[in-house]
Image: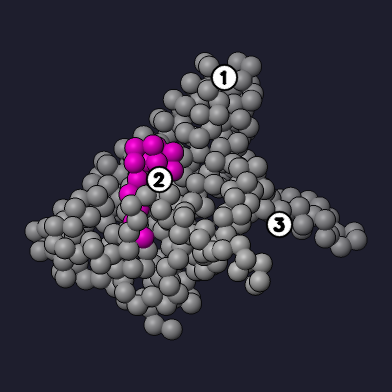
Amino acid sequence: MPAAARVDPKTYFSPEEWAPLARRSPWKGPALVAHAWAVILAAGAMAVAWPITIPLAIAIIGARQLGLAILMHDAAHGALHPDLKVNDWVGNHLTTGDLKAYRPYHLGHHKYAQQPEDPDLGLSAPFPITRVSLRRKVVRDLTGQTYYKLKWSGLVKRISQRKPGEPLWPILKDAVVRRRRFLGGMVATVALTAPFGLWWVWPVLWLAPQATWLPMITRLRNIAEHACVAQGEPDPLRHARSTHANILERAFLAPYWVNYHCEHHMFMHVPCYNLPRTQRLLKQKGAFQAMLSAKSYVEVLRLASSRPERLAAAA
């Protein structure tokens, strides 16, 4: 199968317009990473000082956990810093992802966007679904079921299916190696907070957001980006959807301009902080009308959950 069609920047931009859009700042990307961690620490401090705010802190921290993943995603495109070594170091060590494993996977998604070889096609293929099905998925996300299935069910299954006499230690050793960053963060945080009677900070203010809010908003973000996009879509302006996000959605659902997803697929090396300017220029040139977009996340979710119940039952 041939790769998905690409957009030549020269189609829409003069060299003078394109240069600042594609330029990678040596400080903006790292500053965004620092911002994400600062917000996480501030939300955690708020929850420690006023425990009644813990639910709010969980939503804030979960959104910034997604934000760190988004910034790691920018690093996968070499867009976090102009020096690739610095870019990769920041993406690997100061975000929450494994850049080495993620980069080839994600670039495959861009190469074959909405084509049969797209490794992310399964995320968009089932849509539209019914409202009941969407509610079930959200409930599974918010109750930690999705997190357990993705992160831990494989290990539990592997342990339970051991052959008689098969030692447990190699399985546990492999699990520790695969989760060394997760476990290292847990040990370090508990070691720092437990002497002050705050042993609960890591499970409540890191694990709980990671296991509940983060899976839900990751799902909603995925839906907004690619749900109800035709498989094999030939138009590169319609491989992904951009969704308008208000101030609350940017805080709790779509941080760091991730909602400008059509622009990102059109020009995947443009840093996230330049995507709003990219959209403004495309609007000025009359190109935005042909791009796939939505006026709100509510609009996209209505479309993605528009399958009638009777049709689902018949299927």
Seen from the viewer's position, the closer of residues 35 and 132 is 132
Q: Nearer the viewer, mark 1 or mark 3?
A: 1
Q: Is residue 296 visible?
A: yes
Residue at image mark 2:
254
N-term mark: 2 or 3? 3
**Residue ranking furthest to the right:** 164
Question: Which residue is the site of mark 3?
Answer: 154
Q: Whole-Å distance between the Cαs marked 1 and 3?
A: 34 Å
Residue 73: where, in percent of width, then height? 40, 53
Residue depicted at 50% across the width and 38% down the height:
62
112 relative to 132, above or below = below
Callouts 2 and 1 close, C-beta under 8 Å: no
- The three-letter amino acid code for the residue at tag 1 is Pro
Instruction: Give the residue at x 16% y 66%.
Output: 12
Q: Nearer the viewer, residue 113 or 68?
A: 113
Task: Give the class, few, some or many, for how many residues have Cα within 10 Å of label 1's Cα (few <14, many ≥20).
Answer: few
Q: CA distance from mark 2 to mark 3?
A: 29 Å
Quadrant of the rendered image containing residue 245: top left
In the rendered image, the vertical position of residue 48 relative to residue 290, given as above or below: above
Name the side, left or right, on which 141 lies relative to 241.
right
* Residue beneath disc 1: 51
> Does label 2 or label 1 sit earlier along the sequence?
1
Location of the N terminus (image quadrant):
bottom left
Residue 50 in the image, given as x and y percentages of width and height: 53, 16
The number of numbered badges drawn on the structure is 3
Crowding around mark 3 (Cα neighbors within 10 Å: few <14, some 14 to 19, many 20+) is few
Secondary structure, mark 2, is loop
Q: Which mark is residue 42?
A: none
Q: Is residue 246 magenta?
A: yes
Which region is colored magenta? 241-254
